[in-house]
Image (spheres, rainbow, N blue to C red):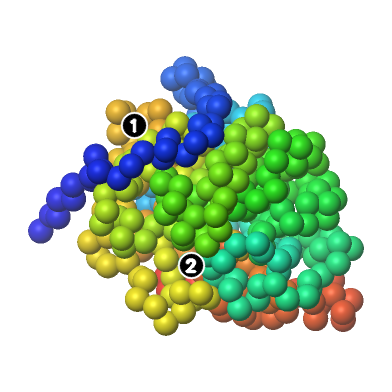
Amino acid sequence: METTIIIPQKTNAPSYVSYSAKPTVLRTQQTSKLEKWLVSFCKQLTLFYLACITIKKPVQILKAYRQLMQLRRQTWGAQVHKMYKVDGRYYNNLYNPGWPSAAYNAFLKDELLRHAFPLQYTGRLSMVFFAITRKCPLRCEHCFEWDNLNKKETFTREELIKIVDLYQQQGAIQIHFSGGEPMVRIHDLVEVIKHAKKRSECFVLTSGFNLTATNAKRLKEAGCKGVVVSIDHYIPELHNGFRRHASSFEQAVNGVQHALHAGLVVTLSICVTKSFIDGGHLMPYMQFAKTLGAHFVQLLEPKNIGHYANKEVLLEETHILQLEQFFKSINSDKKYKDFPFVMYHGFHQRRVGCYAGSRSIYIDSAGDVNACPFCHTKSYNVGDILRAKRKQTPMKENRCPRFGKIA
Ligand code: SF4
């Protein structure tokens, strides 16, 4: 039986523009239809060329290609039309490197080998989420790092760099720096990014704290590609209440503008709670994100860990169905072509499994290595590896306990 979900178009909630310092909006650079077609064509050629030089055997090439296309369909659930050009690179997925770049080619080669030779492939790590600090000025309702926060720092700047080296040797193509609030360690962060950018695309996950115009420029100059700014509501008071900080909304909105002006890829990340969905806030939030000029919006489901441990926060079936329909509709319906790209992991996780455990890991602010930020599945501590002066980490035995892993 088919379920029809109505996406709320209106809400009685006050507009976010009640925020007094209305932001100066910087429009995202739209990609024309012709440009999109040309870029897609060139990407297909790149895929074909890389398949020929890495796989070599025609039958295996065809097999890997088919599987990649199938995985793409299952990940997005619809034909997706959006693409953004930021600083000379084209992006149509927050978690794939921009094209053209060496990182993009490395990512594709990795995926091709993974699908062509699943039995022989030993599994490189392509993505690392790395919490570089335990300090944070906020007290967010959903914080998954809650039990680690505001204790003595685990790693010095030199150790952070060594950890980056360790995972780059294993193939980390993208590194997302988080915390705590990574911007409290802006001086260390800039130096770590300068070091990491030679082999990985770097992103910073922030609440917007300390994301001033100067710091956004420093991140960009260091080689950072983008920021993921957490904004959990378009109504300032509700966002500030969620984050337990009176000026968090203002910092986040200003941070978004500074990041856009600095030429960074900008994603808004939201923890989509039951009350947010039931209150009809999804579409107004997208309008808000569009007005701010964000490239991506990431929908995160609340998980009962950290500050949400033992709380009834998991979404119900009806919420998930609404999010799935919303995700497909915003990304593929032509009437939303000017809206940001929506990322929603829950969609592919429920169909094909989770990328965490096969492609990505999360190093928390205590150095414990988990499958992802939302599943506390510690398999080792990276501090132990450093102290033992080992050049290799253990095999990645941690996997997503909820959805399993994608091959
Ligand atoms: S969720 Fe992030 S910003 Fe909020 S308290 Fe936790 S570490 Fe800080």
Whole-percent x, y for residue 49 in the image? 62, 36
Q: Is residue 225 left or right of residue 295?
A: right
SS assignment at label 1: helix
- Write the residue at 42% across / 66% down: 302
- Write the residue at 85% across / 75% down: 386
Answer few, some or many: residues within 10 Å of disc 2's Cα (few below 14, many 20 plus, some between 14 and 19): many
State which tag comes first along the sequence, 1 or 2: 2
Is the residue at mark 2 in contact range of ligand 1, meaning its CB lies under 8 Å from it? yes
Q: In the rendered structure, which amino acid carries the disc numbered 2?
A: His
SS assignment at label 2: loop
- Which is more toward the observer, 271 or 377? 271
**Residue that numbered label 2 is attached to:** 142
Quadrant of the image containing the N terminus: bottom left
Residue 310 visible to an observer of this rendering: yes
**Residue that numbered label 1 is attached to:** 336
Q: In the rendered structure, which amino acid carries the disc numbered 1?
A: Tyr
- Which is more toward the observer, 281 or 157? 281
Q: Residue 256 bears which disc, if any?
A: none
- Write the residue at 89% across / 63% down: 158
